[in-house]
Amino acid sequence: RKEVEQDPGPFNVPEGATVAFNCTYSNSASQSFFWYRQDCRKEPKLLMSVYSSGNEDGRFTAQLNRASQYISLLIRDSKLSDSATYLCVVNKYGNKLVFGAGTILRVKS
Amino acid sequence: EAGVAQSPRYKIIEKRQSVAFWCNPISGHATLYWYQQILGQGPKLLIQFQNNGVVDDSQLPKDRFSAERLKGVDSTLKIQPAKLEDSAVYLCASSFLLAGRAGELFFGEGSRLTVL
């Protein structure tokens, strides 16, 4: 089983739609969780951290379910500029970050 | 503030040749990472340094890959001899270890390697 698993997509959605991605992780001792965004042929950039209580940043909401070992990312009111690959990242321990393979989002007008 | 610098941006070599990539992290960042990203996959950690010491190199193919971070600042990743399956983007990242910000890595633009 992979340490971090994501649905590769692509998720094709119209502008204004709400879309959600899930990510599962295998190590129950994992300490912290993040979503990174990667545009085509660019480097990954931190989108948001995922806290136990859930957190929201504008149109983006991230949640953590430790019991089921998954994290989620919800994007509301999708914009064309949201088209990218979303990488789920798990900090196993000691700042050792494991990346998922990513979920591709395509927002169409 | 200057970001993570990497060079070269692109490199094309034939199999069995050697190649070296250079990375200069953000000033003051103690931790430096080299990731390999094959097309369609997520970044895979090759090696992690804290200052000039190796924290994790468990996934570094040590028969052909080597990396060093002399003086705890910039770093070099070398591949010798290269294989076709080494074709990938090599991403360097750095982070400033601080409680609560452990997951914020700052990546360079990457070095895209093609092995023919």
Image: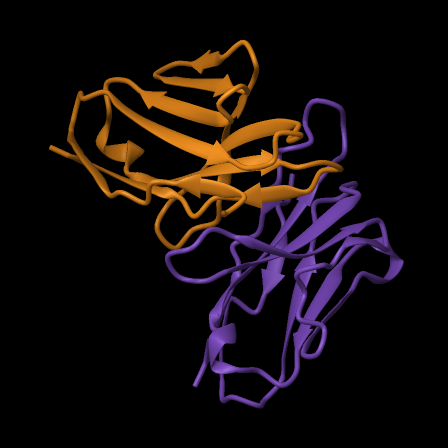
Chain colours: A orange, B purple
Q: Is residue B35 left or right of residue A78?
A: right
Quadrant in which residue B35 is drawn: bottom right
- For the C terminus of chain A, give its image quadrant: top left
Query: Residue A26's x, y, as percent?
Result: 55, 37
How many circles with numbers are drawn on the protein?
Answer: 0
Image quadrant where residue A56 sits: top left
Vertical order, A11 against B55 (above or below): above
Query: Residue extending furthest left?
Result: A109
Query: Residue A76: percent from the left, percent from the top?
Result: 28, 18
Residue B89 left/right relative to B98: left
- Residue drawn at (72%, 50%), measured in percent from left and top? B32
| B70 is higher (above) or lower (below) than A47 | below
Q: Tell me where residue B26 sits by quadrant.
A: top right
Nearer to us in this view, A51 or B104: A51
Where is residue A94 drawn, in percent x and y? 76, 37
**What residue is drawn where x is 74% and y is 61%?**
B75
Q: Position of residue A104 (x, y in %)?
A: 30, 42
Taking the image as shown, residue B44 lies to the left or right of residue A37, namely right
Looking at the image, is B40 positioned above or below residue A84? below
Identify the residue shown where x is 50% and y is 12%. Answer: A54
Nearest the eye: B3 or A16: A16
